[in-house]
C-alpha cells in the first residue's frame, strides 16, 4: 500500500516536471498575473484606501454653531468638506438635488440662526430659574426652537453608516451647544460678579467623531493592492490546477492506463491519493512562491510589499484548505468530463467565473449588495476572505474557521460526487 | 457449483449500457493450468470484453467465474495477485522512460529495490531494449512499445497472464520474440490466456482455442483436433472462415 502510494507520487512528480507548459501555467502565469494586476490596480486601491468622504454643506448660520461644526468636520481625517460647487454657494434645494443625484453621499444643512436659537433657549432656561429678575432681553420670535441641522443621505447609503454619522454629528452638535451655554454662563458671571471664567480650548474637538467612525470602518478595512491581488491571484492559480489535474486523469483513462491500474492488486485509491497528493503539494508550492513574491519582489516595482501578518497557523490552514478544495474539484472534473477539450474549457471557464464572482478581479468591497451576496457562493471567495482576515486583521483560527469549514465542505462534496459517479459508471 | 478447472467461467454475460445486444452471451468455459489458451474471433466478437472481465477491469452483467479456485467477487484481491495483464492498447506513460514505467508497474506489484532492478534488466535484455532503457516511451517505435507494454504486465512473474492481442500491428521480429518468450514462460508452468484474430499464429502457439463470434463460443478444442474434425479445412483459418463467414465485421 505504502509502496503503491510512493510509486504513484514519484510517477506524478516525474510527469509534472516533464510537462514544461503545465509548469508555466501553474507557476509563471500566476506570478506574472500578480505582478501586473498589483501594478495596474495600485493607484485605484490607493484612491479607495485614502479617499475622504465628500460632504456637502450649506451653512446659513454664520455664527458659533455653524462655524464650529464646519471647522470640526474639516479637521476630521475622514471628510472632505465641500461648501460650494463651481464656485457657487448652494441653497438647500440644490444640496438636496446633489445628494439625490448621488453626487454626494451626505449633505448637511445648518439652519439660519442656529446659534441664535441655542443662545435663546439657554437664556430662557436660565431666566426660568430667576422669574423675578430680567436677566436677558429675550427674542420673542424664538419661543419655539427650530431644528438646527438637517442631514440628507444618498438613498443607497447603508443604514449602519447613516447611524454612525447621525449620532456622531448629534454628539458633536451637543458639545458645541454646551460650549455656547458655557460661554453664556461665563459672560453672566463676568457681568454679575466680575469673575472671569476661561474656556477650555480642547472642548468640542472632533476626536470623538473620528474614533466612532474609525471603529465602524475597522471591521471592513480595505486592503491595499498587494493585500488584495496577491491572495486573490494565488487562489486563482491554485484553482487553475484543475486543468492539468483533470487532463491528467482523462489522459490516464483514455489511454487505458486507468483500466490497467485497476487490475493491479490493492486499492486503486492509493494511486489516486498519491496523484492528489502531488497536486495538493503543487498548490502549496504555488501559494508559497506567490506570497514570497508579494513580500519580496513587489517592493522592487515600487509596490506596497505584502504584509502577511503574523497569524501563521490560520494562514497555513487556509492555504491547505484552498489547495484541497482545488484538487478535489480537479478530480471531479477529470472524472466527469468525457474529453480533454471538455475538461479544459469547462475547467477554465468555471474557475474564471468563480474567480469573477468571488471577488478576484473586482474585490467584493467594490461590488453592489446583490453581487456581494452572490460572491459568497464562490469557494475562491471563501479562501480570499480567509486571507483578508489573516493579512488585515491577524485573525485567529476561530475567525477563519467558517471559511475552512466551507472549503472542506466543498472538497467533500467534490469527492463524494466523484465516488458516486465512478460507482455508477463502473456498472456499465 | 464448484470450479472444475483452473479458470472456470459460467454463463458469463455482458451487456454494455445502451447496447442492443450482449457483447458476451452466456459464455461458459474451462481453462486448465499451464495451458496456452487462445480466444479467437473477428473484430467485435467479444474477446476484449471477456478478457477484461476475467482480469477485473469490467464487471459482468451476470454469470460468475473462478480463477485458481478464487471466486471473482469474494476473492478479488487473491485473483489480482496471481495474474498479469497485457492490454490491447499501449497502456504506458509516454513521457516517462521505459525504466521509469517498468519501475512504476513493478512497485505497484510490490517489487522494489535490487530485485526489481534485476527483473527489469533481465527483461529488457531479453527483449533487446537495454540500450533504450532511458529513452521516453513516446520516442519508441510501435514494436518497441508493444514489448515494453508486455514486460510491464509480466515483470512480477504472475501465474496467469492475460494478453489482449499482444502481437497486433508489429514487425515479425518483435512478434517472434514475444511468442518465444511466452512459450518459455509456459514451459515453466505459467498459464497463458491470449486473444488474437491471427489464425496462423494461434495454430502454432496455442494448446487450445475457442472461436468466439457475436459473444458466443462457436467452437473449441486443440488446433489439431479441430482441423481433423473439419474434413474440408486444412487450417484454423479455413475453419474460422467456414464458421464465421466472409461477411465484414466492422
Ligand atoms: N465500452 C463499450 N460500450 C459499448 N459497447 C462496447 C464497448 N466496448 C465494446 N463494445 C461492443 O461490444 C462488442 C464486443 O467488443 P470487444 O469485446 O471489444 O470485441 P473484440 O475485442 O473481440 O474485438 C462490440 O460489438 C463492441 O462494439
Ligand atoms: Mg479487442
Image (cartoon, coloured by chain):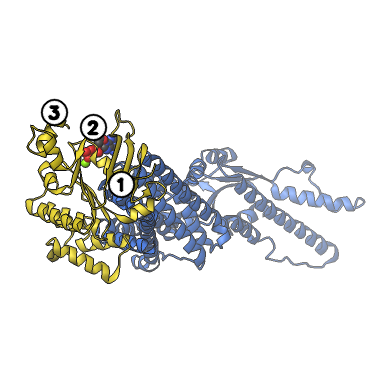
Q: Look at mark 3 in the image and give the residue it sits on.
A: B247
Quarter of the image with the N terminus of chain A is bottom left
Lower position in the chain sequence, tag 2 or tag 3: 2
Farthest-out residue, bottom: B114
Question: Where does the image place residue B41, in percent across and percent down from the top left?
Answer: 18, 37
Chain shown in yellow: B
| For residue A210, side relative to residue A366 (left or right) | right
Q: Are marks 2 and 1 in contact (CB under 8 Å)?
A: no
Chain shown in blue: A
Question: Where does the image place residue A298, in percent across and percent down from the top left?
Answer: 36, 65
Which residue is nearer to you in this view: A260 or A276?
A: A260
Q: Look at mark 2 in the image and give the residue it sits on.
A: B214
Q: Look at mark 1 in the image and give the residue it sits on.
A: B5
| For residue A83, side relative to residue A246 (left or right) | right
Q: Residue at x 54, y 38 (%)?
A: A100
Q: Residue at x 28, y 62 (%)?
A: B106
| For residue A27, side relative to residue B180 (left or right) | right
Instruction: Check chain identity for marks 2 and 3: say if they share one.
Output: yes
- In 3D space, how far apart are the residues under numbered discs 3 and 1 (Cα atoms)? 35 Å
- The answer to whether A254 is drawn above or below residue A8 in the figure is above
Which residue is nearer to you in this view: A333 or B117?
A: B117
Q: Name the subunit of mark 1.
A: B
Mark 2 is surrounded, within 10 Å at the Cα level, by few (under 14), some (14 to 19) or many (20 or more) other residues, namely many
Q: Name the subunit of mark 2.
A: B
Question: Where does the image place residue A383, in percent across and percent down from the top left?
Answer: 47, 54
Q: Circle 2 sits in a helix, a strand or a loop, which is it?
A: loop
Q: Quadrant of ligand 2?
A: top left
- In 3D space, how far apart are the residues under numbered discs 2 and 1 (Cα atoms)? 25 Å
Amino acid at each position: 500500500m505504502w509502496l503503491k502510494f510512493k510509486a504513484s507520487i514519484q510517477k506524478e512528480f516525474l510527469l509534472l516536471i516533464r510537462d514544461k507548459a503545465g509548469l508555466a501555467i501553474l507557476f509563471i502565469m500566476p506570478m506574472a498575473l500578480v505582478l501586473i494586476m498589483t501594478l495596474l490596480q495600485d493607484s485605484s486601491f490607493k484612491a479607495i484606501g485614502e479617499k475622504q468622504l465628500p460632504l456637502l454643506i450649506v451653512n446659513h448660520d454664520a455664527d458659533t454653531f455653524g462655524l464650529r461644526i464646519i471647522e470640526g468636520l474639516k479637521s476630521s481625517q475622514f471628510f472632505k468638506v465641500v461648501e460650494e460647487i463651481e464656485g457657487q454657494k448652494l441653497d438647500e434645494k440644490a444640496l438636496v438635488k446633489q445628494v439625490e443625484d448621488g453626487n454626494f453621499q451626505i449633505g448637511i444643512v445648518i439652519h439660519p440662526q442656529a446659534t441664535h436659537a441655542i443662545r435663546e433657549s439657554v437664556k430662557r432656561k436660565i431666566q426660568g430659574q430667576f422669574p423675578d429678575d430680567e436677566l436677558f432681553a429675550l427674542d420673542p420670535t424664538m419661543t419655539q426652537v427650530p431644528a438646527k441641522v438637517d442631514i440628507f443621505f444618498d438613498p443607497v447609503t447603508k443604514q449602519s453608516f447613516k447611524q454612525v454619522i447621525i449620532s456622531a454629528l448629534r454628539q458633536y452638535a451637543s458639545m458645541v451647544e454646551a460650549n455656547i451655554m458655557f460661554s453664556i454662563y461665563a459672560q453672566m458671571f463676568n457681568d454679575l460678579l466680575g469673575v472671569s471664567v476661561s474656556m477650555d480650548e480642547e472642548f468640542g474637538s472632533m476626536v470623538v467623531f473620528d474614533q466612532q467612525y474609525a471603529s465602524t470602518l475597522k471591521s471592513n478595512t480595505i486592503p491595499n493592492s498587494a493585500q488584495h491581488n496577491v491572495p486573490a491571484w494565488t487562489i486563482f492559480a491554485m484553482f487553475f490546477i484543475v486543468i492539468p489535474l483533470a487532463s491528467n486523469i482523462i489522459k490516464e483513462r483514455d489511454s487505458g492506463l486507468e483500466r490497467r491500474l485497476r487490475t493491479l492488486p490493492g486499492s486503486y485509491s492509493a494511486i489516486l491519493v498519491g496523484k492528489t497528493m502531488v497536486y495538493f503539494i503543487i498548490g502549496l508550492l504555488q501559494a508559497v512562491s506567490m506570497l514570497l513574491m508579494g513580500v519580496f519582489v513587489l517592493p522592487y516595482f515600487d509596490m506596497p510589499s505584502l504584509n502577511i501578518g503574523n497569524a501563521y497557523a490560520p494562514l497555513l490552514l487556509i492555504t491547505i484548505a484552498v489547495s484541497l478544495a482545488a484538487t478535489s474539484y480537479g478530480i471531479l472534473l477529470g472524472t466527469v468530463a468525457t474529453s480533454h477539450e471538455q475538461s479544459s474549457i469547462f475547467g477554465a471557464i468555471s474557475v474564471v467565473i468563480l474567480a469573477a464572482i468571488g471577488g478576484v478581479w473586482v474585490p467584493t468591497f467594490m461590488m453592489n449588495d446583490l453581487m456581494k451576496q452572490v460572491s459568497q457562493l464562490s469557494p475562491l471567495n471563501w479562501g480570499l476572505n480567509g486571507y483578508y482576515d489573516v493579512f488585515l486583521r491577524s485573525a485567529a483560527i476561530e475567525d477563519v474557521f467558517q471559511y475552512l469549514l466551507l472549503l472542506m465542505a466543498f472538497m467533500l462534496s467534490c469527492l463524494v460526487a466523484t465516488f458516486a459517479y465512478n460507482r455508477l459508471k463502473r456498472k456499465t | 457449483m464448484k470450479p472444475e478447472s483452473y479458470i472456470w467461467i459460467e454463463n458469463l454475460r455482458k451487456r454494455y449500457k445502451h447496447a442492443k445486444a450482449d457483447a458476451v452471451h452466456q459464455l461458459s468455459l474451462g481453462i486448465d493450468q499451464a495451458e496456452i489458451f487462445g480466444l479467437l474471433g473477428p473484430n467485435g466478437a467479444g474477446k476484449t470484453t471477456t478478457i477484461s472481465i476475467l482480469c477485473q477491469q469490467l464487471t459482468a452483467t451476470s454469470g460468475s467465474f473462478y480463477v485458481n479456485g478464487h471466486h471473482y467477487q469474494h476473492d478479488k484481491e487473491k485473483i489480482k495477485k496471481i495474474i498479469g495483464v497485457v492490454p490491447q492498447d499501449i497502456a504506458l506513460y509516454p513521457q516517462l522512460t521505459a525504466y521509469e514505467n517498468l519501475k512504476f508497474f513493478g512497485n505497484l506489484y510490490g517489487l522494489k529495490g535490487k530485485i526489481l532492478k534485476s527483473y527489469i534488466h533481465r527483461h529488457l535484455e531479453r527483449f533487446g531494449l537495454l540500450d533504450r532503457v532511458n529513452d521516453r516511451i513516446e520516442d519508441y517505435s510501435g514494436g518497441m512499445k508493444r514489448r515494453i507494454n508486455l514486460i510491464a504486465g509480466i515483470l512480477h512473474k504472475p501465474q496467469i497472464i492475460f494478453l489482449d492481442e499482444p502481437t497486433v500491428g508489429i514487425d515479425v521480429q518483435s512478434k517472434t520474440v514475444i511468442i518465444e518468450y511466452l512459450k518459455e514462460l509456459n514451459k515453466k508452468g505459467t498459464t497463458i490466456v491470449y486473444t488474437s484474430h491471427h489464425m496462423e499464429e494461434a495454430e502454432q502457439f496455442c494448446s487450445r482455442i475457442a472461436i468466439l463470434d457475436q459473444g458466443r463460443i462457436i467452437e473449441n478444442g486443440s488446433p489439431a483436433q479441430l482441423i481433423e474434425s473439419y474434413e474440408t479445412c486444412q487450417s484454423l483459418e479455413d475453419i474460422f472462415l467456414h464458421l464465421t463467414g466472409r461477411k465484414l465485421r466492422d
